[in-house]
């Protein structure tokens, strides 16, 4: 189902959604632009390019209570009554949730994640203007990819939006708004898609398997400073640690780039060297995840490239392999 | 190619060729400069210099092997001086290639730290790459924003900082880029005893940042790297500069300017006017 909405009709649609869903959307200013819980339609800003941090915090917050030690009951029972809806999610980030679903929703279900993710709805917005660090088309995605989405919105550039319902639930929420999309709008969306793909500055083909020397990773890792930006802004990085704090067992984001990530009680650290940590992060995404789940755990959002304090570019790390 | 880049490459190539250093730490990639580690004289051609050479490369002196030469702006040199003063690096093990720097700019605007810079020409160096045009006066009051926040009532101030700290995702990039944050084990990660929570929330994050600022009191050189790299745009420099001003007013001391002055918080006098210290 394709509907065409004016900006005003879109805001009205959001207003309606607010009563049925817990709505998360991009908000904030240009510097601190992230997915936040929205109370009013006006808070949403769809104009920016990709957010600094990914929307993974909606289902996988940077810190959350697993259970209370004193009361001994699971905290998952507190999950919000309303299902969550992410509005204005980029196609790359929506694909990332399909990957997280495999990790958290596999044979052993992670109910902290699935209780938030189940029944959620993803309303995406196509990328008319990819950033200079974007490379979704190199890793199986695209600026207008519909993978993982229920609805895809396209900003037609003339103050109106094309809303494409991609399944029953998606169709249901858009069926009563705006008008049926005319052919001109559909053509426009198609040409925007083509143009966006052409604007993509980075293009490469990830090798099927990675093989490179210790020396290679030592060189590539020299500039790395062991912070967690790349993993924490990444929509697919999903490692966490468990801590006892404030009478609660909490889980917090963790990352293989932290030297303490692999340290054991004995003091032994199998990945003490920086080269091993960087290699681990790249191999996990581009090799091991593929072996286990059949696809690369990178959606090409480019956030790690944009935010790395040392200017490290993951596409360079991958491309320099096997040489 | 500018005369500055030419000079930089010449000095670097010379140092590598003669074997005076094992590695030159500088910047590569003209469009978006980033750290580079050169071990061969021929690679000196990779070096670049422009107004986007943000990184304080002093951060890498501890992690590179062998004697190193470092391309450093005035603020970076102060960090190198701090490392030497604190015994982390030996003066004779580092060759400082100082570069006169007018300002670093982001989207055409000078960085906040560059507006108040008083070290366009490095104070300590082995080689100096000069640029007369870089030697400009500070443009604004260095502590204007600190005074502004200080003037607010305590409750409001706390609310201001807690609001900002809510955003912190504990990526620890501020700590990791800091040349003076070289502790092998940070208080933030100690578990026996555990000093502060690791799960991110406003109060815990504030605890972390204030703790870090205090550990940098009298040591922070205001290179501004912590604030530059923060992915969620927390104005970390403001906290550090509050302490820089306090140290300056209390002890007339500025970190990293001179090598032979004892930092006030690392010394002790039997006749200290404060009872607590006697």
Image (tube, coloured by chain):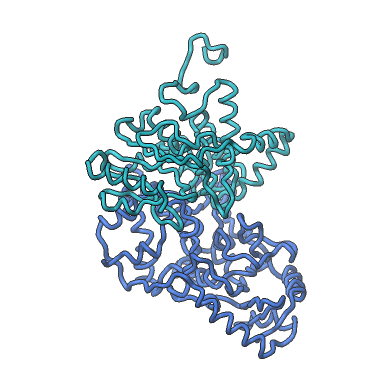
Chain colours: A blue, B cyan
**Is residue B192 in sight in this rendering?**
no
Relative to the observer, which residue lies in front, B181 or B40? Answer: B40
Residue A102 in picture, x, y percent from top left:
46, 70
Residue lying at 54% horizontally and 63% vertically, measured from the top left: A113
Q: Name the side, left or right, on which B160 lies relative to B169.
A: right
Residue A161 in picture, x, y percent from top left:
68, 78
Q: Name the side, left or right, on which B67 lies relative to B158.
A: left
Snapshot quadrant of residue B17: top left
In the rendered image, the vertical position of residue A293 relative to residue A214, given as above or below: below
Residue lying at 56% horizontally and 30% vertically, measured from the top left: B244
Q: How many marks?
A: 0
Residue A268 in picture, x, y percent from top left:
31, 45
Snapshot quadrant of residue A76: bottom right
In the rendered image, the vertical position of residue B55 relative to residue B146, given as above or below: below
Residue furthest left in the image: B18
Relative to the observer, which residue lies in front, A40 or B201? Answer: A40
Residue B236 in picture, x, y percent from top left:
57, 42
Residue lying at 72% horizontally and 33% vertically, measured from the top left: B151
Relative to the observer, which residue lies in front, B18 or A282? Answer: B18
Residue furthest bottom in the image: A183
Quadrant showing the N terminus of chain B: bottom left
Relative to the observer, which residue lies in front, A194 or B130? Answer: B130
Q: Name the side, left or right, on which B66 lies relative to A184.
A: left
Residue lying at 56% horizontally and 48% vertically, measured from the top left: B200
Residue furthest top in the image: B271
Q: Name the side, left or right, on which A300 lies relative to A284.
A: right
**Is residue A296 in sight in this rendering?**
yes
In the rendered image, the vertical position of residue A318 relative to residue A260, given as above or below: below
């Amino acid at each position: 189902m394709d509907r065409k909405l004016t900006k005003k009709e879109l805001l009205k649609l959001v207003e309606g959604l607010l009563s049925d869903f817990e709505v998360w959307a991009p908000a904030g200013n240009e510097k601190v632009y992230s997915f936040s819980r929205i109370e009013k339609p006006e808070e949403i800003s769809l104009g920016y390019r990709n957010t600094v941090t990914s929307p993974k915090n909606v289902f996988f917050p940077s810190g959350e209570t697993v259970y209370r030690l004193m009361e001994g009951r699971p905290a998952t029972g507190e999950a919000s009554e309303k299902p969550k809806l992410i509005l204005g999610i980029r196609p790359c980030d929506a694909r990332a949730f399909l990957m997280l679903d495999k990790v958290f929703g596999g044979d052993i279900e992670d109910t902290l994640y699935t209780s938030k993710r189940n029944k959620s709805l993803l309303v995406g917005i196509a990328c008319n203007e990819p950033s200079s660090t974007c490379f979704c088309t190199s890793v199986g995605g695209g600026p207008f990819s519909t993978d993982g989405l229920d609805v895809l919105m396209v900003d037609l550039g003339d103050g109106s939006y094309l809303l494409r319902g991609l399944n029953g639930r998606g169709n249901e929420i858009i069926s009563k708004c705006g008008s049926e999309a005319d052919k001109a709008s559909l053509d426009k969306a198609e040409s925007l898609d083509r143009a966006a793909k052409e604007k993509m500055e980075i293009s490469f083909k990830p090798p099927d398997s990675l093989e490179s020397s210790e020396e290679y990773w030592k060189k590539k890792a020299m500039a790395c400073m062991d912070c967690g930006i790349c993993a924490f802004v990444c929509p697919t990085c999903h490692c966490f640690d468990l801590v006892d704090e404030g009478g609660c067992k909490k889980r917090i984001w963790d990352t293989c780039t932290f030297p303490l990530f692999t340290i054991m009680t004995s003091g032994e650290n199998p990945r003490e060297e920086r080269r091993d940590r960087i290699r681990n992060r790249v191999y996990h995404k581009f090799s091991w995840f593929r072996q286990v789940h059949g696809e690369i755990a990178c959606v090409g959002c480019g956030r790690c490239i944009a935010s790395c304090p040392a200017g490290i570019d993951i596409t360079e790390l991958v491309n320099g392999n096997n040489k | 190619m500018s005369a500055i880049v030419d000079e930089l490459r010449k000095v670097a190539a010379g140092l590598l060729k003669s074997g005076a250093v094992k590695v030159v730490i500088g910047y590569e990639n003209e469009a978006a400069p980033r750290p580079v580690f050169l071990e061969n004289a021929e690679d000196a051609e990779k070096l670049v210099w422009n107004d986007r050479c943000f990184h304080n490369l002093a951060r890498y002196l501890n992690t590179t092997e062998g004697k190193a030469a470092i391309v450093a702006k005035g603020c970076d040199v102060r960090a190198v001086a701090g490392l030497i003063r604190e015994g982390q690096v030996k003066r004779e093990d580092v060759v400082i290639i100082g570069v006169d720097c007018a300002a670093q700019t982001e989207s055409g605007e000078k960085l906040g730290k560059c507006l108040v810079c008083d070290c366009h020409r490095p104070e300590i160096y082995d080689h100096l790459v000069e640029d007369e045009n870089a030697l400009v006066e500070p443009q604004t009051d260095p502590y204007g924003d600190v005074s502004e926040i200080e003037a607010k009532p305590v409750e409001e101030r706390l609310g201001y900082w807690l609001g900002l700290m809510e955003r912190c995702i504990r990526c620890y990039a501020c700590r990791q880029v800091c040349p003076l944050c070289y502790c092998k084990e940070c208080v933030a990660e100690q578990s026996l005893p555990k000093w502060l929570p690791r799960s991110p929330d406003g109060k815990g994050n504030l605890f972390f940042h204030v703790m870090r600022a205090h550990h940098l009191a009298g040591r922070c050189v205001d290179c501004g790297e912590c604030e530059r790299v923060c992915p969620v745009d927390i104005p970390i420099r403001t906290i550090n500069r509050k302490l820089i001003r306090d140290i300056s007013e209390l002890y007339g001391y500025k970190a990293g300017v001179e090598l032979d002055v004892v930092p006030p918080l690392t010394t002790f006098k039997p006749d200290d006017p404060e009872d607590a210290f006697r």
